Image (cartoon, rainbow, N blue to C red):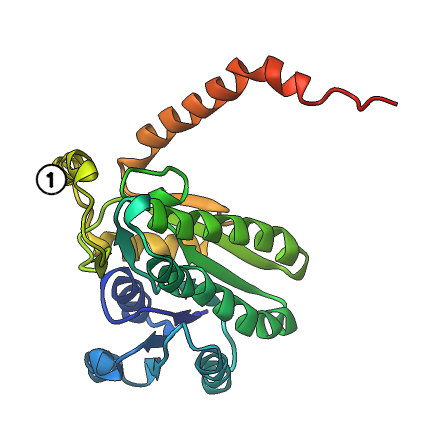
Amino acid sequence: MSKVWFVTGSSRGFGRSFVEAALSRGDRVAATARNLRSLDDLVTAYGDLVLTLEMDVKDTAAVRESVTRAKEHFGRLDVIVNNAGYALFGAVEELTEQDVRGLLETNLFGPLRVVQAVLPHLREQGSGHIIQISSTAGVAAFPLGGGYCASKWALEGLSESLAQEVAGFDIKVTIVEPGSYATGAPTIAVKSSPNPHYQAARQAQAAYGKALDFGDPAAAGQAMLKVADHPDPPLRVFFGKQNLPMIQQVYADRLKNWADWLDLSAQAHAAPSA
């Protein structure tokens, strides 16, 4: 049976790949974007299979209206993909509160708004799959990515709790953690003047980026179908072949760090005096 998808950030990058993968096999999709004209070609190509909705995830009323319209139009919602987001790069010392608040409005509160809008519908129908697009940066931080990593780490924690809360309603949650892909997604540098003390870090990150093997978003779209179709989907899954080796070392280092300081941890647990 074909599925009904609700996908945010459908105009480009991963969102467009997920939408096209679902539509190409006959699924129906409510595709959202801030600019409806960016979705015109989907309507031309797929007709009634797609419902395009103008929506900014920062607008709570617009999110709720779009979810309601999608449910009324298709009769149900099966797969919810929270994809809308952007990257922000800059040293923590360079970030402004405005930089970080704006990022969280989209990358964290955007998915929160969508989740809160769809849950009553999913709970009523007794099924559904919420897929949160995080990042490798959601499990491992890197220099100059403090703001972006913070937004994704927060999304990971929110989603893990969500998965436990809704499991009894037969609603699934999956956190997709992509590595490096040629998505053309928006990337924003901090607006403040670069601090020269971090120039070496910027150069190192630029060299690292040039050496990456960027994945194909179309392949990610096909992988997403397998995640959505699986009867017992994972809570977390990497997209990309470079992620696991890096994360294995990160977690090994964390475990060693905690073990090395275990004596101090025990001292910190001493019973209070009478």
How many marks the image carries: the answer is 1
**Helix, strand or loop under label 1:** helix
Residue 173, given in percent of the width and then of the height, sits at 52, 55
Is residue 26 shown left or right of residue 158? Answer: left
Residue 206, given in percent of the width and then of the height, sits at 13, 40
- Inspect this view and state whether residue 80 appears: no
Residue 53 sits in quarter: bottom left
Q: Residue at x 58, y 55 (%)?
A: 162
Question: Is the residue 72 above or below the residue 13 in the image?
Answer: below
- Inspect this view and state whether residue 7 appears: yes
Q: Quadrant of the C terminus?
A: top right
Q: Residue at x 61, y 73 (%)?
A: 120
- In the depicted view, which residue is nearer to us: 185 or 196? 196
Q: Residue at x 65, y 55 (%)?
A: 165
Q: Amino acid at mark 1?
A: Lys
Label 1 sits on residue:
210
Residue 55 sits in quarter: bottom left
Question: Is the residue 114 above or below the residue 191 in the image?
Answer: below
Q: Residue at x 67, y 17 (%)?
A: 267
Residue 19, given in percent of the width and then of the height, sits at 31, 68
- In the depicted view, which residue is nearer to us: 234 or 193? 193
Is residue 93 shown left or right of residue 79? Answer: left
Is residue 29 shown left or right of residue 235? Answer: left
- In the depicted view, which residue is nearer to us: 226 or 183? 183
Q: Residues within 10 Å of mark 1 (few under 14, many from 20)?
A: few
